[in-house]
Amino acid sequence: MTGVVKGILIAVVVVVLVIAIGLGVGIYWIASRGPAFVEKSKQSVAEGERFGRETDNQGCVNETLARHKQNPDFSGALANQLFLTTCLQRSKATPGFCDLVPHRTEFIKSAEWQVEQCAKNDLHDSYCRQIFAQVEAFCDMRAAREEKDNQ
């Protein structure tokens, strides 16, 4: 065997091992934490529905930001996304809420807006932008619904 063939075989074995380890860790995580994660997700959706019925769109964002400051890690970010998505769907409209929100398809403008909103709210973690990505998704869906209703 030539050195090139040996190198390729070693690289393939390493890649296969990394994938196998990743799968093993993923299966372990799902088996050990999956049920708790599902329960926390259901709880976040229920809280978002309840809170949304009592507030407007901006109130949902404000509450999500407060929750995020309390729990800015990965699991908190997922719970906050579920809360915000559900809350926004149930909440009353805030006049002008979507006026300055870029469309998700405006990639550069969208990224800049998300970073700006995080800085404005004194959040500098890696999960903050997901909050404002949900706001963009909500505003895009609202605009599509309004466009459909006007046809």
Image: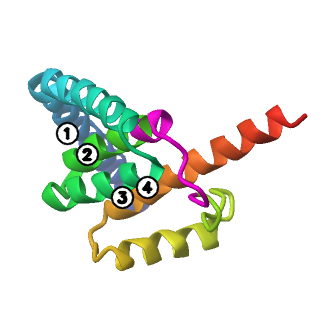
The nearer-to-camera label among 4 and 1 is 4
The residue that label 4 is drawn on is: 58
The residue that label 1 is drawn on is: 21
Residue 143 is left or right of residue 148, and the answer is left
The residue that label 3 is drawn on is: 7
Q: Quadrant of residue 46?
A: top left
The residue that label 2 is drawn on is: 18
Residue 50 is left or right of residue 66, and the answer is right
- Callouts 3 and 1 close, C-beta under 8 Å: no
- Callouts 4 and 1 close, C-beta under 8 Å: no
Circle 3 crowding by C-alpha within 10 Å: few under 14, some 14–19, many from 20: few
- Callouts 2 and 1 close, C-beta under 8 Å: yes
Residue 4 percent across, percent down from the top left: 43, 60
Distance from the alpha carbon under mark 4 to that under mark 1: 43 Å
Residue range of the region highlighted in magenta in the rendering: 87-97
- Callouts 4 and 3 close, C-beta under 8 Å: no
